Image: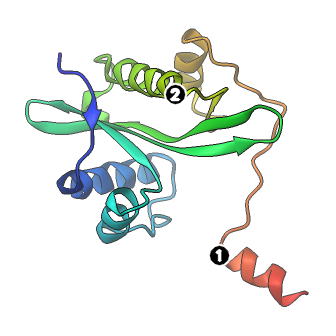
Amino acid sequence: MTQPRLAIKKDMPRVLELIQELATYEKEPHAVEVTIDDLENDGFGTNPKFTCFVLELENSIEGIALVYPRYSTWKGEVLHLEDLIISEKSRGKGLGTLLLDAVVKYGKEKGVKRICWEVLDWNESAIEFYQKKGANVMRDWDVVQLDEAGINNYLNQL
């Protein structure tokens, strides 16, 4: 089986397709606002905002892992795994393990103190996968967000 590689700009149309597939799987098919241009500009400009690994099967990208740096007030530099996506038709073939391996190796090379990510509480297969890999699924934490409308509403109240 082929190993993950760093994504290149021309991979972004397929990366966006997988992002959309994940949004559909997570029951939010209309939530994706990012565009191919966004991915190309944000990932491959002079100051890339993310690093993306891709994994191909039979000359088609069937999995991605997108990460970016964060800073923890408790730990220092950490790595955030935004998404690990395997196409539905390619699940169960070990691609997730290969991509997670690449992310962990990358984090180790960068010297980060932690790698973190979120998982939906109903995605038991993903939770089981991460726990088998030694990840601590912290069920006593809630994700807190302000979306664009929430940001605007917040600022309008100032």
Residue that label 1 marks? 148
Q: Residue at x 51, y 52 (%)?
A: 27
Tag nearer the camera, 1 or 2? 2
Residue that label 2 marks? 107
Mark 1 and mark 2 lie on one chain; the one further toward the N terminus is 2
Residue 55 appears at what percent x and percent y? 25, 32
Q: Amino acid at mark 1?
A: Glu
Distance between the alpha carbons at the discs numbered 1 and 2: 30 Å
Residue 94 appears at what percent x and percent y? 32, 16
Give the vertical position of 42 relative to 144 (above or below). below
Give the vertical position of 132 relative to 120 (above or below). above
Residue 123 appears at what percent x and percent y? 57, 32
Q: Residues within 10 Å of mark 1 (few under 14, many from 20)?
A: few
Residue 136 appears at what percent x and percent y? 70, 19
SS of the residue under disc 2 = helix
Q: Residue at x 51, y 47 (%)?
A: 26
Q: Quadrant of the N terminus?
A: top left
